[in-house]
Image: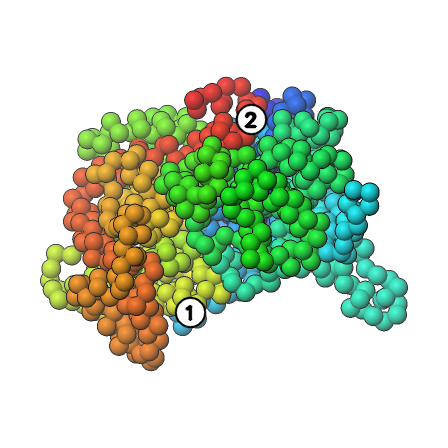
Amino acid sequence: MARVTRPDRQDRTDPMKEEILAHLRYSLGKDAEHAALYDWRMALSLSLRDRMVDSWYQSTKASYTGHKKRVYYLSMEFLIGRLIEDVAANIGLTDEARAAVTELGQDYDILVHDEPDAALGNGGLGRLAACFMDSLATLGIPAMGYGIRYEHGLFEQDFVEGQQIEKPETWLAQRHAWEFERPEVSYKIGFGGHVQHHEGKAKWHPHETVLATAFDTPVVGWQGRWGNTLRLWSARPQKEFDLASFNRGDYLAASRSEALARTICRVLYPDDTTESGKELRLKQEYFFTAASIHDLLRRFFIDHDDIRALPDAAAIQLNDTHPAIAGPELVRILVDIHGLEMAEAIELARRCLGYTNHTLLPEALERWPEWLLGRVLPRHLEIIRSIEDSQQSHHPDSPRILDHGNVNMGELAFIMAHKVNGVSALHTDLVKSTVFADLHRIHPNRIVNQTNGITPRRWLYECNPALSKLITREIGDAWPADLDQLSRLRDRSGDHGFLQEFMAAKRVNKERLSNWVQEHCGIAIDPDAMFDVQIKRIHEYKRQLMNILETIAFWNEIHANPNGNWTPRVKIFGGKAAPGYHVAKQIIRLINDVAGVLNNDPVTKDLLKIVYPPNYNVTMAEMLIPAADLSEQISTAGKEASGTGNMKFALNGALTIGTLDGANVEIRDHVGPENFFLFGLTAAEVTERRSHHGYARAAIEQSPRMQKVLAQIAEGRFSPEEPSRYHDLVGNLWDHDHFLVSCDFDTYFDMQRRADEAFTQTSSWAAMALNNTAGVGWFSSDRTIRGYARDIWNVGSAIDGELEQSA
Ligand code: H2P
């Protein structure tokens, strides 16, 4: 299939260098003498982009001429991160690009670091979408990712006196190198207004409209064999501005439509923000979903006449409920425009749609007030009623979409999808037995599992060159596209020399991180200490609180016996709290307050350090994960749907300390229970424990260690200037503790000490670490995508033989 080569340029010496210089001159209007860092970085990016284009064109053409079924992945979030290294690695140009830039007298690493980190997502859900795009392209599955081109991605986090401060993120302040604007691909998207019914036909007359305009980023897979498109929608006013109003002096009215358009794509909403502009969020969801549906239908009609063939041409995947309005939107088009009967339209739409559930947390399941949905999307509300009627007529006991004045988007997505999937085995079981238990009874074959995965290209090959090179030397270079091959490393877990090399690679990464921490946080850390890392959104269920309480308990323990044989630790945290999530922000502040005391304690400072760099993002993860010894995956069992960070750490040779939650369960199975520090209640035990009145108080009363820590916090040991700062946080642990920190605390502490002990046995630790890397090949997102392709989308690869490999 299409490969990335430019035969016409290959005979020239150093084509990459020439291409960079040409872009500097003709795309940026600079010469080498006057070019700024931005110019060099853009010239490099544009040169790399050029090298993707041929493969990308050929793939698109092949999809059309081969009449291939396409996957449409609709996601509010794509947590892309930086792309220079990603693109260079995928098309095999890393060395060439570095050499060319160096020869031009520039520092390649500085150029790479100048690129903004595209943070169009909150956490795992958005990063999963980005990994999926990489795997879809690598496997040669014709696909498009559809999302929103937010002007401001996830806020930038800063700490002021330990407290999180949010600042707007500005990735688009400079031109984005990778995208192509497509002004000709524009759709009118309406909101509000009324519905006219005439002779059995409905017509929606929206009150306001904006134009959705496409921006395309090519996504080329491993070795450039196939390229797909990430199409992000931006909003433009339908009328540029109203000259008549302007001339009357009514400047506000003149730019009203511009303001609406601008607002729609202005910001990515942070997860769990409770009181954010609900209406605007709904408009965002409809905006990108409707644009995507229009776009895929336009493509469909290029080579089809009969809309009834749509399910053979398009698999539409809803990443969470955010695009769930796709169901009613498709039905609306089928009925109001193509004249299908409602029942047939619903069935046809369902055959196209799949829905991925990512969470069981009730507060994260979207519900819109009926009046709001009816005001913004009046025709869709009517259609939702028809969907509800049709469901009730077949299944009178079905859970309701419309319930107590709300529209339940989870139920809507479920009912409108032919397959619903959870993201780990445990999560899928819980989806069946809890949130969607009744719907599962009615539709017993609808829910399937697709355990999440991660792309090994970004999460090992690129972010960990030291380990990648060693692996390639041992097992050859096929592993980035066939990660199961890593299991061949298992043979080496008794080879002392190899284990030393394996740990030497870890050491390189730990030194790199230590230098970075010194430079950016002003904290000296010892690369010989155990690097213990917890990086993810800050949330009560993820239990960063338990981690910091355990850190204090360990500190107390050292104080009680300063000459004990302690294993030095560096506790590293990273993550943002949703701006409206007060408790999460308190947890951040507590971590920073505790760090302030511990890091300056002369007794413990060589044994225990806390590092919490602000503004955790994909780029930071790429540095932290390869340097980690211990991966913290300590959520309350039953709450973390899957986790994907857990997979990245294990892949890079960190051991996990974790609960039986989400994909931890499967990771432990794959790496072997002897290579995993397991503790804590199981999901069933959690449910059982919660039924006991006063379970938290009872647990704390049995743990003198935890009592002491809570007393220290409550007395203001870490916030002497405001002793009552954490009274609520501590009080909540005694009285409620919904996430059972109290119940798991002691076993967590004990398991940490087991980890300390294990870490001192350097060669057995190395073997355990190696067994983690060797054991997690299954968690490649290539495997996940093969599963979706087979069980949900019914699509094949356009690169011969790629998918069969999976069977
Ligand atoms: C969520 C879940 C994770 C899951 C991820 C992708 C919403 O991400 O909580 O358990 O792995 O989706 O399916 P996160 O918490 O990381 O923002």
Q: Earlier in the sequence, mark 1 or mark 2?
A: 1
Q: Secondary structure at mark 1?
A: strand
Percent x, y for residue 770?
27, 36
Q: Which residue is mark 2?
A: 795
Compare residues 97 and 157 and report the one nearer the observer.
157
Look at label 2 and name its amino acid.
Answer: Val
- Asked if one can make out residue 269 in the rendered structure from this viewpoint, the answer is no
Percent x, y for residue 154?
53, 56
Classify mark 1: residues with Cα within 10 Å, few (<14), some (14-19) or many (20+).
some
Look at label 1 and name its amino acid.
Answer: Gln
Percent x, y for residue 606?
22, 61
Residue that appears at 37% across and 32% down: 778
Q: Secondary structure at mark 2?
A: loop
Classify mark 2: residues with Cα within 10 Å, few (<14), some (14-19) or many (20+).
many
Q: Which residue is mark 1?
A: 163
Q: Give the quarter of the figure containing the C terminus.
A: top left
Percent x, y for residue 458?
45, 40
